[in-house]
Image (cartoon, rainbow, N blue to C red):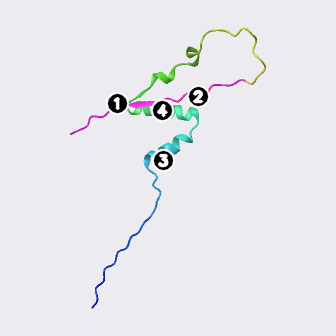
Amino acid sequence: MALSARLEIRQGQGLVITPQLQQAIKLLQLSNLELDAFVDAELERNPLLQRDERDAEPDAERRPRSRPTSPPTASPTLTPAPTWTRLTTRPRPVNG
């Protein structure tokens, strides 16, 4: 009866879609109105979330109030990109 030693190594690769990744994919597919409604619902549902008011300032308050001296040229009107609302959480206590 012969005994022999044998070593075998296997390697595999897989894709795991975590709950966080699933949520990110879902949020990326929402329109601005749907995203705003989702954020409002999450703010109401979770008392630890709060809206970051620094990003919610209207554009009119950020711009200087000076008027141009010449009439505007006939160029296409550019609308500012929508601002994103940042959600912040309060730190959780660490049990030690």
Tell me the residue that label 4 is attached to: 39
Q: Is residue 20 above or below residue 14?
A: above
State which region is magenta: 77-96
Q: Is residue 91 above or below residue 69?
A: below
Distance (Cα) linking label 3 and label 1:
23 Å
Residue 94 at x, y percent in the picture: 25, 37
Residue 23 at x, y percent in the picture: 48, 44
Q: Which mark is residue 82?
A: 2
Q: Residue at x 76, y 12 (%)?
A: 71
Mark 1 or mark 2: whose residue is earlier in sequence: 2
Instruction: Look at the magenta stretch and give its main secondary structure.
Output: loop
Q: Residue at x 55, y 35 (%)?
A: 34
Disc 3 marks which amino acid?
Answer: Gln
Q: Nearer the viewer, mark 3 or mark 1?
A: 1
Tell me the residue that label 1 is attached to: 90
Mark 1 or mark 4: whose residue is earlier in sequence: 4
Disc 2 marks which amino acid?
Answer: Pro
